[in-house]
C-alpha cells in the first residue's frame, strides 16, 4: 500500500502539469469581426405623402348623334387615336338622300327668287312710267320677299341635312387612347344608345389628392408654396413614376365633411404608366434640401428604452448609442440625435455585439453600404 502512494502522486502531478501546459497553449479570445460604414451626411428635402387618384386631362364618351345601323369599327380596342380620326360609321345613305333632296329644294327656291326679282323690277319700271299700278308693284315686292324667305329656309334645311350627314362619321375630338367598343357592328344606334367607346388623353396625366387644413397651414407657415415643391408619384408596386410633376392647382373650397382641400399635380406620362382612375401616392418634396445624418434602416434596433445602434469607438470597442430617428427614405433613415457624420456604424454582425466588446471592424463593401 505504501508503495502505491508515490505512484499515484506521480500520476496526479503529471496530469496536472499536462493540463496546465495545454491551457497555457490556448490563444486569447479573437475579436468579433464586424462590418462598419461611416454615418453619411447628405442633403435631404422634407417630404409629405398623400393618397391620390389619377385623372385624365381630357376624356370623351363617344355617342351616336343620329339613328342608323352601325358599320364596321375603324380601330382596335386600346389603340392610340389622333384628333379627328374616323372611328365609327353609321349608315350614311338615308342622310345623303336627304341632303340631295334639300339641295333640290334650295335650287327651286333660288329659281323662285330669280323670277320674283325679274317681276319686281318690271313692275317697278312700269310704275315709274305710270303704265303699271302701285298695287302691282306692292304685290311683286311681297312676292320677292317671300321667295327670299323660302330660299333662306331651304338653305337652312340643307345645312341641317349636311350636319346630320356629318354625324354618320363618328370621329375622335381629341388625341388619346380609346377603350373597348361597347356596341358591336350591325346594331341600330342613336342618341339614346349610350356610350359607343371612350377616348382618354393620357399625356399629361393629372393627379388629385386631398390635404387637411392643418397640413396646408403648416406648409404655408414653413414657407412652402406650389412653386417651391416637387411632386412625385409612387405606384402600386412601390416604384416611383420616372417623371416629376408640378403642383398646378389648389381648390378654392374646403370639403366640410373631411376638412380637406383638393390639390392637383400634373405629370408627364410618356410611358403610359399612369391610367385614368388609378390610385397612387403623391409625394410633395421641398426643392431646398438640408444636410442630415443617415444610416441604413437595417442597423437600427429597439428595446423598451427606445431606438439604438452600435458604433465602433476608440480601441475598437463597441458602443451602444441611443438615437432619435427622423423620416425614412429609400432604405435609409435619418438620425436626428445621438450620432455624428463619419462615425463608424456597425452594419453587419451587430446582433452578436455587446456594449464594451472589442471588435475587428472592416469597411463594408459598396453593396452593403447602399442597403
Image (tube, rainbow, N blue to C red):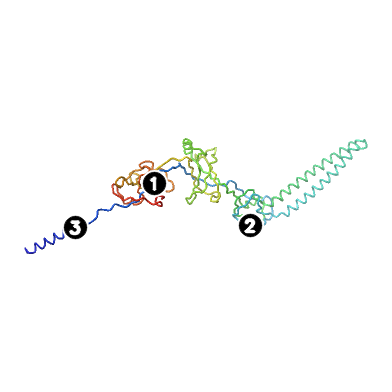
Q: Nearer the viewer, residue 263 or 69?
A: 263
Across and down, in percent, residue 282 comes to 50, 45
Q: How many residues crowd mark 2 within 10 Å: few (<14), some (14–19), many (20+)? A: few
Left or right placement of residue 51 versus residue 26 in this view: right
Across and down, in percent, residue 147 comes to 82, 43
Q: Which numbered disc, 3 or 2, marks the residue closer to the eye?
A: 3
Q: How many residues crowd mark 1 within 10 Å: few (<14), some (14–19), many (20+)? A: many
Q: Quadrant of the N terminus?
A: bottom left
Do the CB atoms of the residues marked 3 and 2 lie less than 8 Å apart? no
Where residue 39 sits, quadrant-wise, is top left
Residue in view at x 14 percent, y 60 percent: 14
Kindly report the distance in space between the C-alpha atoms of the residues bearing marks 1 and 2: 60 Å
Q: Nearer the viewer, residue 90 or 146?
A: 90
Q: Nearer the viewer, residue 110 or 249?
A: 249
The residue tagged 1 is 295
Q: Secondary structure at mark 3?
A: helix
Residue 184: image tag: 2
* Mark positioned earlier in the residue sequence (3 or 2): 3
* Mark positioned earlier in the residue sequence (1 or 2): 2
Where residue 122 sits, quadrant-wise, is top right
The residue tagged 3 is 21
Q: Secondary structure at mark 2?
A: loop
Q: Which numbered disc, 1 or 2, marks the residue closer to the eye?
A: 1
Amino acid at each position: 500500500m505504501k508503495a502505491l502512494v508515490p505512484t499515484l502522486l506521480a500520476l496526479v502531478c503529471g496530469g496536472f502539469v499536462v493540463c496546465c501546459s495545454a491551457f497555457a497553449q490556448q490563444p486569447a479570445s479573437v475579436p468579433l469581426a464586424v462590418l462598419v460604414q461611416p454615418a453619411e451626411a447628405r442633403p435631404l428635402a422634407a417630404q409629405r405623402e398623400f393618397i391620390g387618384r389619377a385623372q385624365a386631362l381630357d376624356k370623351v364618351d363617344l355617342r351616336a348623334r343620329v339613328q342608323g345601323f352601325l358599320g364596321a369599327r375603324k380601330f382596335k380596342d386600346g389603340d392610340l387615336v389622333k384628333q379627328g380620326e374616323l372611328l365609327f360609321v353609321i349608315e350614311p345613305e338615308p342622310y345623303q338622300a336627304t341632303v340631295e333632296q334639300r339641295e333640290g329644294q334650295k335650287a327651286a327656291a333660288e329659281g323662285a327668287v330669280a323670277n320674283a326679282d325679274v317681276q319686281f323690277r318690271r313692275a317697278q319700271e312700269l310704275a315709274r312710267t305710270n303704265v303699271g299700278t302701285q298695287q302691282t308693284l306692292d304685290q311683286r315686292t311681297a312676292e320677292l320677299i317671300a321667295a327670299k324667305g323660302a330660299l333662306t329656309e331651304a338653305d337652312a334645311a340643307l345645312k341641317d341635312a349636311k350636319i346630320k350627314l356629318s354625324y354618320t362619321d363618328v370621329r375622335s375630338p381629341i388625341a388619346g387612347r380609346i377603350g373597348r367598343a361597347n356596341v358591336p357592328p350591325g346594331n341600330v344606334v342613336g342618341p339614346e344608345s349610350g356610350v359607343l367607346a371612350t377616348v382618354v388623353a393620357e399625356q399629361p396625366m393629372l393627379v388629385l389628392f386631398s390635404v387637411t387644413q392643418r397640413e396646408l397651414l403648416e406648409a404655408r407657415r414653413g414657407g412652402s408654396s406650389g412653386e417651391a415643391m416637387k411632386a412625385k408619384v409612387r405606384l402600386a408596386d412601390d416604384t416611383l413614376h420616372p417623371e416629376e410633376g408640378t403642383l398646378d392647382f389648389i381648390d378654392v373650397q374646403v370639403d366640410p365633411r373631411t376638412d380637406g382641400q383638393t390639390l392637383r399635380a400634373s405629370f408627364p406620362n410618356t410611358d403610359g404608366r399612369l391610367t385614368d382612375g388609378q390610385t397612387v401616392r403623391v409625394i410633395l418634396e421641398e426643392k431646398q434640401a438640408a444636410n442630415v445624418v443617415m444610416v441604413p434602416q437595417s442597423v437600427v434596433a429597439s428595446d423598451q428604452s427606445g431606438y439604438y445602434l452600435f458604433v465602433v469607438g476608440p480601441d475598437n470597442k463597441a458602443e451602444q448609442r441611443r438615437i432619435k430617428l427622423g423620416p425614412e427614405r429609400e432604405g435609409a433613415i435619418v438620425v436626428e440625435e445621438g450620432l455624428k457624420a463619419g462615425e463608424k456604424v456597425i452594419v453587419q454582425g451587430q446582433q452578436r455585439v455587446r456594449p464594451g466588446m472589442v471588435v475587428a471592424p472592416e469597411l463594408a463593401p459598396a453593396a452593403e453600404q447602399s442597403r
